Amino acid sequence: MNFVDIALMAVIIAGALYLLYRSLWKKKGHCQGCDSETCNVKKKFNPKH
Amino acid sequence: MRTQKNADCGLRIADLKSEIANPKSEIKTITVAVAGNPNSGKSTLINAIAGTRLYVGNWPGVTVEKKSALFEYEGTNIKLVDLPGTYSLSPYTQEEIIARDYLVHEKPDVIVNVVDATNLERNLYLTVQLLELGIPVVIALNIYDEAEKKGYKIDTKAMEKILGVEVIPTVATKKMGLDNLLKAITNITNSVSMHRPKKLNYGSDIESSVSIVEKQIQNSYSQLSEKYPLRWLAFKLMERDSHVMEEINIENQSFIEEATRHLKKAHGEDMESIMADARYAVAAGLTREVLKKPEFKKMELTEKIDKIVLNRFLGIPIFLAAMWLVFKLTFDVSAPFGDWIDAMTAGPFRRWAEVILGFAHAPAWTASLATDGIIAGVGFVLVFVPVIFAMMFFITFLEGSGYMARAAFVMDRAMHSMGLHGKSFIPMLLGFGCNVPAVYATRVLENPRDKALTSLLIPLMSCGARLPVYVVFIGAFFTAYVGTVLWSLYVMGIALAVLMGIIFKRTLFKGESPMFIMELPPYRMPSFRSLMIHTWEKGKHFLIKAGTYILAVSILVWFLLNLPWGVEHKKDSYLGKMGQVIAPVLAPLGFGNWEAASSLVSGLIAKEIVVGTMGEIYVQKAADENKETPTLTEDLKEMGTSFAGAVKDSAANLISTFGMASLSSKESTEETKERTPLRDVIKGQFTPLTAYAFITFVLLYMPCIVVAIAMRQEFGTWKWFGIAFAYQMVLAWVVAFVIYQGGRLLGLG
């Protein structure tokens, strides 16, 4: 185990912790509702969509 | 359609002229509020027009907050605002307050009043109130096809003449009448509409009182007449509407009393009742004018089905049977696809990751992180995605068909025993999909006491995230009773919710339960497209979870299993040591080993992570390690043929609805044994009794972190989550203890 390994591990752990914080707290678990971007969309009216 | 500019030359010239008159930089944006009774199809209409995926369900109260969608029509940006369904604009329920505040304070350019054509009179009561606001209205006479099927003849021209608004027949589910509706909206905003909303006459005595109040407002409180629609404000003052009185806070109210005294004396009622009667009279009179029903009414299919489904003795058994069928079908349809994903993650994906990392000369430990951590952790969760999607499909079908509203109705009596009413069962039903939107859906409940109590009970509803844990254990120990064991867990959750509700009613939430009045929608066959969209909407967040926090936890668990670096036995790792500390608490429940304890701890983030962690702990190497490594082409060929086999098996299972599921069939069990090393390991670690105690514990122990966040958001405090955490931990331990120790006493262990 050298310095590069330790640095790489630290980056991976920090990334995993950030992903956890972002998806659980900021994105509220990606659950249904406006937070999951199902509302406020802009589209053109298309009767066949 | 209007956006097709090259339909003919004439249109092109017209468009050119229009562009010269209105340069593109000045695209007009108009706001259109969509209002109507609950379950009249407002969200469906918006989805049909704007291509959004707002949540719809065939029961009242699906939309509990306003939502919006923006789209372009003939060079105009139209912002559609979906308001919660209301029967009136009185300030009694949360939905009514949200809808009314928006209409009065935000002043949309147009209101689209979605009217259920099969229930004209009741819907027109709201229409009458919307017209009082003085905002231009277009009526979308929705569900028109069903009204026609019933033999109703609605004279839309007469309606337009009486109300002074355009009436457009629509069928939102089939996208019929939408273009006419949009044309009517833009005609109003472009001032080319020939229709002017009429001031409906409530009778000379009421009208004379209203004009007195209106004059007084204009003379003494002119600023109010700018802020509020004058006629509406006059009515609200006469009714002594508590919200309006509080908002405007006028000192001298004697003119209101003077204007209404003779009315109250003549009718012998308060003004609110007098006005409600007057509005009902207008709605009823209008309905008589425009609606012709067939003389002989035959018993409709909905009534025939309801006679059986809502029977006081048969209602609950039918509900339980329906749920059993859902679980059975879920397994029958999804199991072959789960096996396929399992074989892929354990085989080709693992091999490919090793090869790619080898090519990149990555450190050896990264290969272990990728295969034993990420692929084992995330892969074991992905295996259950087909089960989750199948379950969501059947639940969406029950919602869309109108049966879920009946489920709430038949559960009303049980709900009353715990101090709630059937309306609370609706958020709880949503909890079968995911507990998080279910906690948000408690907004539909008017009473804060009901809201808190319902939120406390929602985590007992078994969400889709718990399915992977059940499937692993049921697949390992209860292959002959797949549907029944799964059904027993869901029923246990409901029964314990009733029991805890009764306990809470006598302790934390003393008081009478309110009355429950719920409109039962007609049975409808949900369209396949709508079913697929809403199944996807419900199920996709499990996929997103797998790619986000399940991935993150899998990585962290791998590190916890391998630190201190170079640890020989997983038992001596940080995770192993933590598991060993907790394990003695679980020993009386039959699963007091560090592996189970560690998995339960990681499952606090999300319940499906229990399986992912078990995958990382128990399964070290791919099952086919000693076999000859296949080439990429062989892998791809195997993926294709095994997927075709999964489709064939799934179709065969579906056809033989009551035949045994692939999980329970002998052939498939053998296949599964070979393909899923986790089940094999679990078989060596658990017995059927400890396995059942374990999955019961998973069902009941604390709600996941995201539910905790949702509760914090809804109540503004951690208090209710704290209570849920404490009681669920105790409940889970006690129930698992009773199952394990009781089973041992009966000689089952």
Image: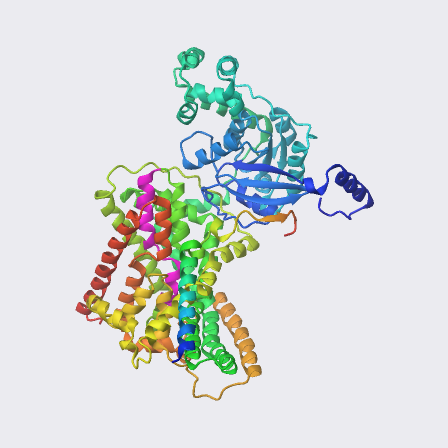
Q: Which of B70 and B111 is in front in this view?
A: B70
B43 w.r.t. B671: above or below: above
Image spot of residue B604 (x, y percent):
33, 61
Q: Main secondary structure of the magenta part?
A: helix
Q: Residue at x 57, y 80 (%)?
A: B637
A25 w.r.t. B36: above or below: below
- How many numbered discs? 0
Image spot of residue B200 (x, y percent):
56, 21
Asked if residue B16 lies left or right of residue B413, the reply is right
B165 w.r.t. B389: above or below: above
Tell me if I can see residue B372 in this picture: no
B575 w.r.t. B192: above or below: below
Q: Quadrant of the C terminus of chain B?
A: bottom left
Q: Nearer the viewer, residue B306 or B180?
A: B180
Tell whether position B452 is magenta: yes
What coloring was used for the rendering?
Answer: rainbow
User: In the figure, residue B10 lies in which quadrant?
Assistant: top right
User: In the figure, residue B311 lies in which quadrant?
Assistant: top left
Asked if residue B26 lies left or right of residue B62, the reply is right
Q: Nearer the viewer, residue B229 or B696?
A: B229
Tell me if I can see residue B183 in this picture: yes
Asked if residue A28 lies left or right of residue B692, the reply is right
User: In the figure, residue B644 lies in which quadrant?
Assistant: bottom right
Q: Which of B665 and B405 is in front in this view?
A: B405
Image spot of residue B206 (x, y percent):
49, 15
Q: Quadrant of the N terminus of chain B?
A: top right
Tell whether position B81 is magenta: no
Image spot of residue B329 (x, y percent):
44, 63
In the image, the segment drawn in magenta is B447-471
